[in-house]
Image (cartoon, rainbow, N blue to C red):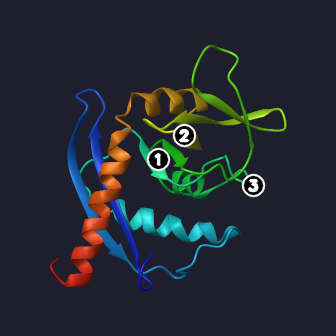
Amino acid sequence: MIEDLAYSGLIVYNINNKEIVNLFFQTFKPIFTEYFSSILFLNQTEIYLDLIKNIDIIPDCYVINASGQMHPYFYGAACDFGLQIETPVIGYTKKLLFGDLRLNNVKSNISQVYSEENLIGYAIPKLNTKKFYYISVGNNISLQSALTIFTQLDLGLFSSFRNDLNNYIQNRKRGII
């Protein structure tokens, strides 16, 4: 968030054709502008709801940059957003906020994230780095389905999207849009 505003964006992606169908950005004035690791993560739900209210199509699934069940309360912003809509939601983060990373028993480069003995998410390697995307269930989807969908995505979309969002923010600050 910059200047007490939240900048958000949405990619409509056709997973079968592996192509971006639409790209949309907007600015939102949230009630709270700082993130605190408490229940104030619920403030993010309004940002996501505001973002999707003007899109013409309803996707089969949302993948949002927020924790799902891989959260200290087992209920992150992806869960809250998922309860507000009837569409499956997968949450992802770039940092492990909660849980313990364990190597997968199967020969795979995808690790599992546990809370005690409960599987709550997966760690999917980022391209050409030693870092991960951490995914968990937001709502209306199983963890296995979330993993299947996420691994079918072109993971380069995330860095490309971040660059596009940064350009949008810079252009807004310059008054170009």
Mark 2 highlights which residue?
140
Mark 1 highlights which residue?
86
Q: For residue 176, what is the image quadrant?
A: bottom left
Query: SS for tag 2?
Result: loop
Residue 59 visible within the image: no
Mark 3 highlights which residue?
72
* In this view, 147 is above or below 106: below
Identify the amino acid type marked 2: Asn
Choose mark 3 or mark 2, whichever is in front: 3
Mark found first going from the N terminus, 3 or 2: 3
- Quadrant the C terminus occupies: bottom left
Q: Is residue 98 left or right of residue 140?
A: right
| Disc 3 crowd, CA 10 A, few/some/many (<14, 14-19, 20+) | some
Mark found first going from the N terminus, 1 or 3: 3
Residue 108, percent across and down? 58, 19
Residue 24, percent across and down? 25, 59
Residue 102, percent across and down? 73, 31
Query: SS for tag 3?
Result: loop
Q: Are marks 2 and 1 in contact (CB under 8 Å)?
A: yes
Identify the amino acid type marked 1: Glu
Task: In the displayed orientation, state which residue is furthest to the right.
Answer: 116
